[in-house]
């Protein structure tokens, strides 16, 4: 049996027996690179019941400030390589649409338009923003893609290692609020309703890209695959002869791949968000990279959330959301969404606690 590991964090590596490459540091301060998850690929190249044997292949590609890894099963190398190439091409196209680091991305061109003017957008950008507004409404704004002004302010504050002033926060927050984003599904337009709005898709973009890459693979007849984009993972059909992909979740606050819990998944998404590596201390207070839209500042409580859901788009948007909402409201949100489960780890005064939503135990396996 071949076994591989995916560890997500600022210094993480994708470790597999067939290949070892350093993970490119993410240039942005977004939700990904935050999770401490590990994926153990039940990847034995067993012969399936069908007449044609499937073999395991792994491909890697830098995109969206991280490293996308595709592990798939295909009859032969040419078919595997062609499918992976097409999937990565799709990811690159989505980066050109959703990036807030590329000045000429579709997202940034939208933000540069005068506020109050409906702007036609691509189907992908419209779909991502539509999904974002759904989560924003369900979470009472804990998830908010209009948080861009606060993100930029917080990046600058982290560099100078000083908190933004109340006046700076107030100015940034004046342009934040999911209600200030209007979508017209008939005209396929987006309207920014306030001046100086900047959208940030860091909390949903990688999950959406992983899902779209999975669709490309399935369109080419490759259903047994796993796509990892840092802490956001899209899972297809299980490896041959296995009931699913075994995903391990590390303990809160560890910088290693020590696995504490496992879940077995197929045709699902899983994302983990925490601050074990991306945080800063200012004035003796530890601030997470995860920003609370209500305050414009990083979280100060120690919390890590893992979300299992129907797809990676949903889980990517929910892991940071649950972290912001906290245990009680976060678990309630997970329970309210079909096919969704949450594992929340907290630490307070050195004491660690574990909380799970109602569906989590049906998915969890004992850690080995």
Image (tube, rainbow, N blue to C red):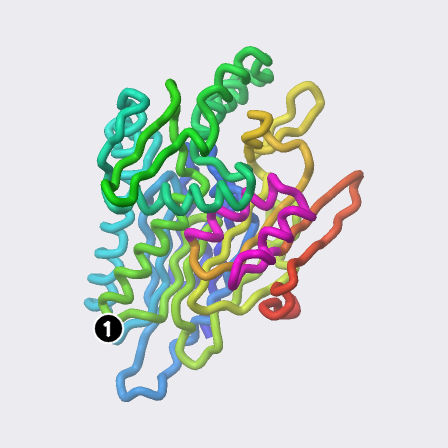
Q: Is residue 330 magenta?
A: yes
Q: Majority secondary structure of the magenta segment?
A: helix
Q: Which residue is mark 1?
A: 76
Question: x, y percentage for residue 352?
Answer: 75, 48
Mark 1, other Cα within 10 Å: few <14 / some 14–19 / many ≥20: some
73 shown above or below 58 = below
Helix, strand or loop at mark 1:
loop
Q: Is residue 92 visible?
A: no
Q: Closest to the observer: 359 or 262?
A: 359
* Residue located at (30% from left, 56% from top): 213
Question: x, y percentage for residue 162?
Answer: 59, 16
Q: Is residue 263 left or right of residue 91?
A: right
Question: x, y percentage for residue 358?
Answer: 65, 63
190 shown above or below 355 = above
Q: Is residue 301 magenta?
A: no
Q: Quadrant of residue 122?
A: top left
Q: Closest to the observer: 99 or 179?
A: 179
* Residue located at (34% from left, 50% from top): 209
Q: Closest to the observer: 88 or 342?
A: 342
Magenta-drawn segment:
313-342
* Residue located at (46% from left, 59% from top): 269
253 shown above or below 3 = above
Q: Is residue 101 left or right of residue 314?
A: left
Number of labels in the image equals: 1
Question: x, y percentage for residue 48?
Answer: 36, 84
Q: Quadrant of the C terminus?
A: bottom right
Q: Is residue 50 left or right of residue 305?
A: left
* Residue located at (53% from left, 42% from top): 34
């Amino acid at each position: 049996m071949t076994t591989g590991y995916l560890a997500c964090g600022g210094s993480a590596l994708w470790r597999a027996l067939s290949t070892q490459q350093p993970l490119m540091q993410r240039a942005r301060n977004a939700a990904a690179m935050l999770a401490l998850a590990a994926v153990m690929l039940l990847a034995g190249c067993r012969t399936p019941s069908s007449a044609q044997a499937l073999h395991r292949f792994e491909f890697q590609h830098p995109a969206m400030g991280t490293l996308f890894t595709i592990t798939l099963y295909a009859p032969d190398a040419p078919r595997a390589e062609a499918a992976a190439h097409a999937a990565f091409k799709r990811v690159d196209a989505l980066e050109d649409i959703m990036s807030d680091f590329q000045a000429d991305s579709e997202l940034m061109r939208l933000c540069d338009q005068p506020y109050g003017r409906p702007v036609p957008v691509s189907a992908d950008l419209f779909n991502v923003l539509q999904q974002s507004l759904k989560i924003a409404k369900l979470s009472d704004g804990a998830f908010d893609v209009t948080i861009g002004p606060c993100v930029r302010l917080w990046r600058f504050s982290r560099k100078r290692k000083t908190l933004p002033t109340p006046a700076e926060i107030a100015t940034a927050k004046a342009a934040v609020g999911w209600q200030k984003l209007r979508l017209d599904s008939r005209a396929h337009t987006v309207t920014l309703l306030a001046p100086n709005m900047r959208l940030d898709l860091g909390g949903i973009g990688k999950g959406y890209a992983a899902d779209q890459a999975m669709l490309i693979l399935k369109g080419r007849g490759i259903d047994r695959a796993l796509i990892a984009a840092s802490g956001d993972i899209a899972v297809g059909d299980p490896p041959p002869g296995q009931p699913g992909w075994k995903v391990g979740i590390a303990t809160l606050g560890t910088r290693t791949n020590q696995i504490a819990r496992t879940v077995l998944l197929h045709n699902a998404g899983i994302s983990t968000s925490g601050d074990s590596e991306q945080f800063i201390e200012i004035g003796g207070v530890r601030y997470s990279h995860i920003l609370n839209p209500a305050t414009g500042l990083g979280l100060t409580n120690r919390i890590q959330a893992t979300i299992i859901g129907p797809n990676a788009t949903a889980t990517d948007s929910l892991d940071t959301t649950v972290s912001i909402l906290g245990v009680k409201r976060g678990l309630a949100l997970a329970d309210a969404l079909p096919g969704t489960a949450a594992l929340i780890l907290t630490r307070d005064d050195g004491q660690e606690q574990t909380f799970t939503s109602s569906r989590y135990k049906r998915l969890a396996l004992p850690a080995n």
